[in-house]
Amino acid sequence: MPLKYDSIDVSPEGYIYAKKNRKWSLIDSRTGKRLTSFIYDSLYGLEYYNLFVGKKKERYVLIDEQGKEISAYYDIMNNLYAEEALEFMSTSTDDCMKYDLVNRVVAGCDTMFREIRYNRPPRFKVVGNDKFNGVENTVTGELVIPYKYYISQAGDYFVVCDSLTKGNAWANYGIMDTLGNIVLSPKQTAGVKWLKKFGGKSSLFRILKDGKYGIFDADTRQYTVPLKYGMIQIPGADSFYGDFVFAQDAGKYGLVNAYTGETKQPHIYNYIGHNVYQVDIYTTICGNKYGLLTGDGELAVPCEYDYVSAFTSYKYFIVGKDGKQGLYDRKGKLIIPIEYDQIDYNVGYADEVVADSIVRLSKGDYSVIYNLETGQNEKSFTYNGQIYLQTDRPVIMESELGTYTYSLVDGLNGEEIVSRKNEMRILDDSLLYAHTYGHVNGPDALTEIINYRSKEVLLSRIDGDISHISSHYFFIFDGDKSTIFDVEKRQNVFPYIYDQIEVISGNTAIVSKNGKQGIIDYKTGETLTPAKYQSIFPVTWFMPP
């Protein structure tokens, strides 16, 4: 390829993006044939699919491997990674396209979520004058709700307030649709809150009237939950999750279906609250006792324990009572009796969590690793007085709590293989990287490469910079010059002659020497390109600007 382009980049599929006069073109690197003209402001490939996306004048087009444009130009493009598809849309018309990347067919357009997914300009918007709000149709310019309310949008509806109290608090709330029709009169309604549905459409509103709360469906113009509760709390900080609300009756909370009004859990709780990190788990409080409900309204843990702690997956729950611990599953079954001093989850191997179902049960001097799925004890080993799940590979353990030193330990019996280093890293099935910190009035810093099966030290450097490159090759920098060390041959591949070495791929590395760069085979030391260039850059695949 001649030296005539401002910039080039190569894709894994063997195509070149070439830039000239601020425009991009696609070139087949195998033949050198230019597949498109220099017309795109940006151009990038869809890895694995041999398809490309061009951008011109802020609009997107899909291009095949022959350089042919196979779609119209669209204002917006979205990559649906999970579906292995692209979605295109025009903001000025209803035109859109969903393209199946695997089968290379147009799969239709998901129009239902276009406004949400692409932040498309809404058909209706709240506008205002010096005193009130109104609602305008952005297509026709028509004022569908006049300037006489204080208004906020709620999905396909608008919450309106027709007056302020003397303290400038909103009062007299109602609901109107996009045609300006009154759905719920603002007269004598003290509060309206939209139940914004996470990931979907919602026409439900919490209503406060005459001191009582209920749930109103604006689509059907009917109350799904009657106006009879002292308070209704909505799960979710910003969005309504699931089907249930927390309704208070006679000072106690229960779980009520927002769509049917059915009471799923009785009004016996002082408090029900959603979990911040897992929205389909509800915490219950009865006096000074705790329990849990699930998002589908079922009882997971009775409200009778001193505390409840959830596993990471929220499949199991540790409960505490009178100084002892037990375990519930999500279906409300007590699977470990309340008799253990401590239950630890996220246990697994010493250096890796195997599954959420592996726990450590401790009672007095007795400890065991237990599998909740199988109901069986697992084989274990003991190290520093603690038990861990047995494994047939070595594991790195903290030598002694709080010492910041680590040892390589046999995963079958807990015996130390390599002891007390400040840093350790297993490189492969026999090599270990180990580093010991230096001290001002003590020994210097020491870096070692150890065959942990034979316990032989293969490479040892004081205050040296050692990095693992591949298999048995290591980069060594002595503060001035660099080389590559072959631990199998126990020798440097070449002398300390290079200022810098950068491995790029395969056996090749870019080297710097006396301000110039070249390329070598780092496994043999053979010079592939003499060090005579001002700079050499590896070709990588990325999206050009």
Image (tube, helix red, strand yellow):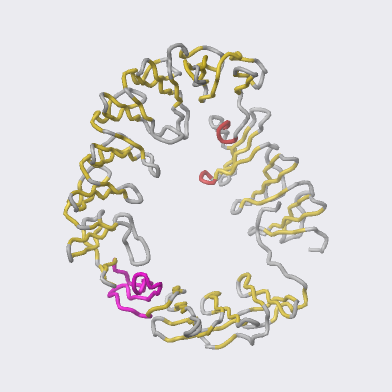
In the image, is 14 to the left or to the right of 246?
Answer: right
Residue 432, compared with residue 133, is above or below; it is below
Which residue is found at the position 80% from the left and 58% from the top?
6
Residue 74: x, y in percent? Answer: 68, 36
Query: Is residue 8 on the magenta stretch?
Result: no
Q: Nearer the viewer, residue 523 or 494?
A: 494
In the image, is 259 to the left or to the right of 64?
Answer: left
Magenta-colored segment: predominant secondary structure: loop
Locate the N terminus by quadrant: bottom right
Residue 33, compared with residue 142, is above or below; it is below
Residue 520, compared with residue 198, is above or below; it is below
Count of marks placed on residues: 0
Residue 368: image quadrant is bottom left
Residue 179: x, y in percent? Answer: 56, 14
In the image, is 435 to the left or to the right of 482?
Answer: left
Query: Is residue 399 on the magenta stretch?
Result: yes
Which residue is found at the position 17% from the left and 63% from the top?
364
Q: Residue furthest front?
A: 166
Q: Nearer the viewer, residue 171 or 434?
A: 171
Residue 270: x, y in percent? Answer: 27, 33
Which residue is found at the position 58% from the left and 45% from the top?
101
Residue extent of the magenta highlight: 389-418
Residue 285: x, y in percent? Answer: 27, 38
Residue 341: image quadrant is bottom left
Q: Nearer the viewer, residue 108 or 5?
A: 5
